[in-house]
Amino acid sequence: MIYMLEDEEGIRNFVLYALRSSGMEAEGFETPSALRAAMAERLPELLLLDRMLPEEDGLSVLKKLRSDPGTRKLPVIMLTAKDSELDKVEGLDGGADDYIAKPFGTLELLSRIKALLRRTADDNAGADRLMLGGLCICPSKHEVTADGSRVALTLKEYDMLLFLVRHRGEVFSRESLLREIWGYDFSGESRTVDVHIRTLRSKLGSCGELIQTIRGVGYKAGEEPLD
C-alpha cells in the first residue's frame, strides 16, 4: 500500500490513478490529520509527501515520522513545487529518501517508487531474523526460540515480544504498550500488560531476563544489566 499526502485534488487523483493502473494499492489524503488517522489503522509501504500543506508543513510531518519508532524507517518521497537546491537539501537532510520536483513525469515517478521499494526490500532481506541474547524471532514464520528451544506464545505475547525486541533499548510505559499491542488507550488496565509480561518471561526461561522492568516507567528489551 502506498499513501499520498497532497492537498491539490487534481495532482492527487492523477498520481493515484497512475499508481493503481500500474498494479499498486494506493490511497490519498488531503491533510496531515487524515493521514495520521489512516496510519493508525494501517502503515503503508511507502509515502508520497507534499511539502506545502494545510495544517502543517511537509517537513514537519516528515520530522514526526522519523521521530516515531514505528515509522522511523518508512520510505518517503517528497513531491513538491519547491525545487531549489536548498529545498532539496532540506528535504533530504530532513529524512526524505528521495525528492521529486513538480511538475514530474509519471514514468519517472513510478520508476523511482519501484527503485525505492526494491532498495527497502534489499535492506530488510537479512532482517527477518531478530536476535537478542539467546532469543531468536523469525517474523515470517511467526517462530520464537529461546536458547535454541522453540517457545509457544499466545498472539499477544508474541506481538509484545516482537515489538519490544524491534525497539530494543527503548522504554515503553504500560499505557503505550496497551495502545501498540491491544489497540486502545489506557483506561486503568495496566494489569493486562503486567500479566502478559510475567507469563512471557516464564515461557522464555533464562531469556526472560531480557525483558526488563524500569521501575516507575514500564518495560524494555535489553541485554545490559540493570543497576
Image (cartoon, grey):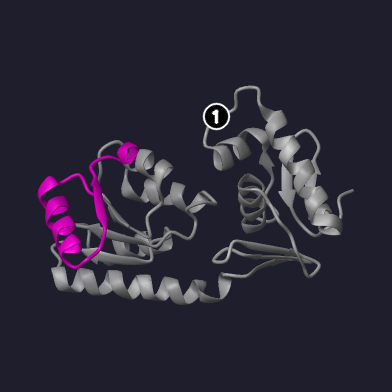
- Magenta residues, as a range? 5-34
Picture residue at 39% right of the left edge, 62% below the top: 75
Task: Give coordinates of residue 10: x percent, y percent.
Answer: 9, 50
Q: Quadrant of the N terminus?
A: bottom left
Tell me if 142 is positioned left or right of 203 in this view: left
Residue 30 sits in quarter: top left
Task: Give coordinates of residue 173: x percent, y percent.
Answer: 67, 37
Residue 206 sits in quarter: bottom right
Tell me if 15 is positioned left or right of 136 in this view: left
Count of marks, rendered view: 1
Q: Is residue 15 magenta?
A: yes
Picture residue at 14% right of the left edge, 68% below the top: 106
Q: Nearer the viewer, residue 20 or 103?
A: 20
Q: Secondary structure at mark 1?
A: loop
Picture residue at 57% right of the left edge, 63% below the top: 139
Q: Is residue 218 magenta?
A: no
Q: Which residue in the structure is indicated by mark 1?
A: 185
Q: Nearer the viewer, residue 25 or 105?
A: 25
Task: Give coordinates of residue 49: x percent, y percent.
Answer: 29, 54
